[in-house]
């Protein structure tokens, strides 16, 4: 019997009766004493000293692969141990006949499903961008799709642990962290509104579960990788709009979504400026058009007339995509990496831009952060200063673009020197 506070015994067994239940002592975490005569019948002891009778079972005919579910029969004091035992026998009899008491009870009292909670979560923050909401819906459907129709109280800690491990193996550490973080956030509001509902991700973490430690991918110096990326992109990216989108990202350090969703109405070729309204930081991004960007935009504008009218609003259009603009080029990353000989992913352009600006050209950090629309810390001194003007940004933006162009024109160490910048790369 678990009588020592703070200690959690996984399989404490007793004969559930008044004397035995009275003797159960609370710990610093909830724990369960199981009946030694009726499998699945137990008493949950809370840190407050409260005790509840429960029934644990697996629904359906999936055996040990079926989801583990629990039904709370009632609190000790309101019902007696003998009454709870009879209720447990009735509940387990229903399970044996193919019923699912936990789901029936959830439906009867209006327990929301995970899909309901996700919809509520996405609608609760009006300041969150639609692109972020789309990303959350995508992650929920891809990694938790089979749970969306389930009541919130039917998803258990053990299922969370198993799903986290499976996503880690099948998709990687970062998607596993993102999926569980999203699930944890989705549960927070219902856990406040619905008495007795507990967040299964918090239960998993409380039982010793851990997110994967976040690590940042490191890149070699721009002088090493830029010629390799150029070689890989020129060889593997056949779609002109996609190729130009990649070069645009290289010369600006912008985030992928900000580049792909750029519209012509936000481009002013007369004043050589462009503007992105929806950004990760929530702050609109306005930047000067450098010589390299001007050549890219002129090439895109020349190709615009040949595009269907339905996609002409986008700077980087794609008639084959649902959105009308080119989509995430992640499928190209392995090919560019293999052909070029250096690890490639789009966000590495941002790493490269910042490295050139701050390490090669020694630009002030606040200026670099403004150029890439980086979320700046709460620096009081910086907060007193007026924002950078386009005129102030134009010369440093051009210096960074010129330096990137020069580095990209050099052959990587161990290869023949490559002269000149081909169309679609350094020349825009």
Image (tube, rainbow, N blue to C red):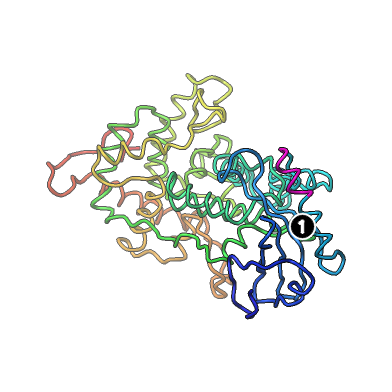
Q: Which residue is mark 1?
A: 72
Residue 95 is inside the magenta segment: yes
Q: Secondary structure at mark 1?
A: strand
Residue 366 drawn at (x, y percent): 47, 65
Residue drawn 21% across and 38% down?
Answer: 420
Residue 42 drawn at (x, y percent): 70, 62
Residue 359: which quarter of the image? bottom left
Say above or below: 372 vs 76. Answer: above
The one nearer the camera, 365 or 79, is 79
Say above or below: 412 vs 77. Answer: above
Quarter of the rendering occupied by the N terminus:
bottom right
Say above or below: 33 vs 111. Answer: below
Q: Is residue 24 left or right of residue 322?
A: right
Quarter of the rendering occupied by the C terminus:
top left
- Crowd around label 1: few <14 · some 14–19 · many ≥20 (10 Å): some
Q: Is residue 289 left or right of residue 126?
A: left
Q: Which residues are magenta?
A: 90-98
Say above or below: 109 vs 262. Answer: below
The one nearer the camera, 308 or 172, is 172
């Amino acid at each position: 019997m678990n009588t020592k506070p703070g200690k959690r015994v996984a399989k404490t067994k007793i004969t559930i009766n008044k004397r035995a239940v009275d003797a159960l002592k609370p710990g610093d975490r909830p724990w369960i004493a199981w009946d030694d005569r009726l499998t699945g019948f137990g008493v949950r002891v809370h840190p407050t000293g409260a005790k509840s009778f429960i029934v644990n079972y697996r629904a359906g005919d999936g055996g040990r692969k079926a989801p583990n579910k629990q039904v709370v029969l009632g609190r000790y004091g309101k019902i007696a141990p003998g009454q709870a035992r009879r209720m447990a026998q009735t509940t387990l009899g229903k399970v044996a006949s193919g019923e699912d008491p936990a789901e029936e009870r959830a439906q009867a009292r209006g327990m929301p499903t995970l899909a309901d909670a996700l919809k509520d979560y996405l609608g609760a923050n009006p300041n969150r961008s639609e692109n972020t909401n789309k990303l959350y819906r995508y992650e929920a459907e891809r990694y938790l799709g089979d749970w969306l129709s389930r009541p919130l109280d039917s998803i258990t800690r053990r299922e969370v642990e198993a799903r986290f491990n499976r996503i880690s193996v099948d998709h990687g550490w970062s998607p596993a962290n993102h999926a569980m973080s999203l699930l944890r956030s989705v549960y927070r509001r219902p856990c406040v509104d619905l008495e007795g509902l507990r967040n299964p991700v918090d239960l998993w973490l409380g039982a010793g579960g851990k997110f994967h430690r976040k690590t940042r991918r490191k890149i070699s110096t721009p002088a090493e990788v830029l010629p390799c990326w150029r070689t890989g992109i020129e060889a593997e990216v056949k779609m002109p709009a996609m190729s130009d989108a990649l070069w645009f990202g290289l010369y600006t350090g912008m985030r992928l979504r900000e580049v792909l969703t750029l519209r012509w109405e936000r481009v002013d070729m007369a004043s050589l400026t462009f503007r992105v309204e929806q950004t990760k930081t929530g702050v609109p991004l306005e930047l000067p058009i450098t010589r390299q960007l001007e050549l890219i935009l002129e090439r895109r504008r020349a190709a615009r007339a040949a595009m269907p009218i339905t996609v002409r609003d986008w700077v980087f259009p794609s008639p084959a995509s649902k959105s009308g603009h080119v989509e995430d080029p992640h499928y190209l990353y392995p090919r560019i990496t293999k052909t070029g000989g250096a690890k490639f992913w789009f966000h590495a352009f941002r790493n490269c831009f910042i490295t050139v600006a701050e390490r090669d050209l020694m630009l002030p950090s606040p200026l670099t952060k403004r150029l890439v629309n980086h979320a700046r810390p709460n620096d009081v001194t910086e907060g007193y200063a007026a924002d950078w003007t386009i005129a102030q940004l134009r010369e440093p933006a051009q210096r960074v673009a010129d330096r990137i162009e020069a580095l990209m024109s050099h052959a990587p160490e161990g290869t023949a020197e490559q002269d000149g910048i081909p169309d679609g790369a350094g020349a825009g």
